[in-house]
Amino acid sequence: MGFFEKIFSSPWGVHPDDHKRPAADVPVVRLPVPTRLFVPLSQHVGAAARPRVIVGQKVLKGECLAEAQGNISAPIHAPTSGTILAINEITAPHPSGLPMLAVSIEPDGDDRWLDCQGLTSPFAESPQAIAKRVADAGVVGLGGATFPSSVKLALGLRSEIDTLIVNGSECEPYLSCDDRLMRDKALEIIEGVRLMLHSTGARQALVGIEDNKPEAIAAMRKAAEAYSEVKICPVPARYPMGSDRQLIVELTGREVPSDARAADVGVIVHNVATANAVYQAIYLGRPLITRLITLNGGAMAAPGNYEVLIGTMVADVVAFSGGYNEVSPRLIMGGPMMGIVLPHARVPVVKGTAGILAFSAAEMAEQEARNCIRCGSCIKACPMGLMPLEMAANIRAEKLDGAEKLGLSDCISCGCCSYVCPSNIPLVQYFSYAKGELSAQTRAQLRQEAAKKLTLSKQERLDRETREKVEAAARRKAERAALAAKPTGEVKQAPTESIKETGNEAVNEGVAA
């Protein structure tokens, strides 16, 4: 039995129908520049970018619209040339439909690039220089996490990184943008992987690709055959194989502890699309302003993969592709297991958008939840080794602390437990609710502690001021008492002697004259 088979013998995860074809087999279509672009300032983990343009300003393609704020942030760039129309709020691509700040651009039709300078010999540069260029290009994790890539590349300076894992598993059903990218841009991806190795100091790169993507595996093997440090590793097609911790175990046998990071076990993980973005940033000097997304689902007229400018409205993408097959489909950004339901199509494509799914009524048929039969299917499916039924029971009883003790914080919200539950219990929704409540409680506790600290500080200041006033009053009282205690003769003698001295001085001055 081979290594991968031994690892795969673990019963975690599920194997839903992937629904990746025919979308994966259709050639990529490049979307034309839309009439308006809405580029959000927060498309990444960390602080939102700070605008550096003003309304009415002309910008070139690739020009920086907003700069990063702090260490965990990323800049935003113009997807095309045009005029800044506004910097205002738009609907966020989130089920809440809450507003988010974005830069609105009216394209001028020229699509004229800023003068971008790439590196001809990037491996002669220092790892820090590579990481800085990646940061300046606004590259973030394109597998969904959107963590600033430069921060992870710089981990090699602080941690002992020996292995770079490149995630090409794309385990979510319906999505095939990474598959298509590996087929079409394998050479660029491998060059990006080599740059990541150079930046992190890792000795080897393991590219994990699920075995249901034979065309991608073949293309990547051919592109990497000249580089012994880059190994293409087919992995079993099983959800959620694309989760970082599961892929690390699958490819290295190392398990990341609950309270640790991948870097603590000598590994960092990047996505294949991120590797391609790194190639673009270093060799071509181009920032991240476009990405490949999958359009799929039973209600989508023309499933396929489309190259789309960041900031393009979902409605514009769907309209260009041919629209829907039925009225009012359910829109999901991302995959069906971990994606988010969109409030409507007037939201922008962002850096983390891997796909737009339009589900038909048949695909979205909801089944009524019933009582738990304690079959244990959710426990077997959980890739993190948790007990979803026990956590859910605690959450229903409002015992959030009990759920937390059972490992709620380790839940990756993959949805495997909900998928296999024969009672159709929405387990992952329970966990999302509990995480939100615990997070709110933590924030409330921090606010209370901050308010208590401010109150104590104010009271200390008032006590100090009162003490200083009392001490000052006591000093003045003591001074008055000291003056009052002096004999009367002593007090009057001083002026007499002074007059006498003044008179003597006057006599002396007269004699001298």
Image (tube, rainbow, N blue to C red):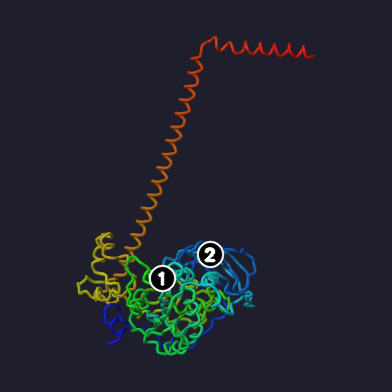
Distance, label 2 to label 1, CA atoms, is 27 Å
Disc on the earlier residue, 2 or 1: 2
Please identify the residue farthest to the top as the structure is shown. Answer: 489
Indicate the secondary structure of the residue bearing disc 2.
Answer: loop
Question: On the rendered structure, is 430 left or right of 479?
Answer: left
Q: In the rendering, at what x and y percent does residue 485 appear?
A: 48, 14
Q: Is residue 399 above or below residue 172?
A: above
On residue 451, which mark appears? none
Amino acid type, mark 1: Glu
Q: In the rendering, at what x and y percent does residue 315 appear?
A: 50, 76
Residue 302 seen by the camera: no
Foreground residue among 237 and 508: 508
Instruction: Bin the neighbour count of mark 1 within 10 Å (Cα to Cα): few under 14, some 14-19, many 20 and up.
Output: some
Q: In the rendering, at what x and y percent does residue 412 appear?
A: 34, 70
On residue 160, which mark appears? 1
What quarter of the picture does the C terminus occupy?
Answer: top right
Question: Which quadrant holds residue 204?
Answer: bottom left
Amino acid type, mark 2: Ala
Foreground: disc 2 or disc 1? 1
Question: On the rendered structure, is 326 left or right of 397?
Answer: right
Q: In the rendering, at what x and y percent does residue 62 appear?
A: 59, 73
Instruction: Bin the neighbour count of mark 2 within 10 Å (Cα to Cα): few under 14, some 14-19, many 20 and up.
Output: many
Residue displayed at 58% across by 71% down: 78
Question: Which quadrant holds residue 137?
Answer: bottom right
Foreground residue among 35 and 23: 23
Q: Give the labeled residue for mark 2.
A: 68
Residue 213 seen by the camera: yes
Does the residue at mark 2 contact the one at mark 1 (Cβ under 8 Å)? no
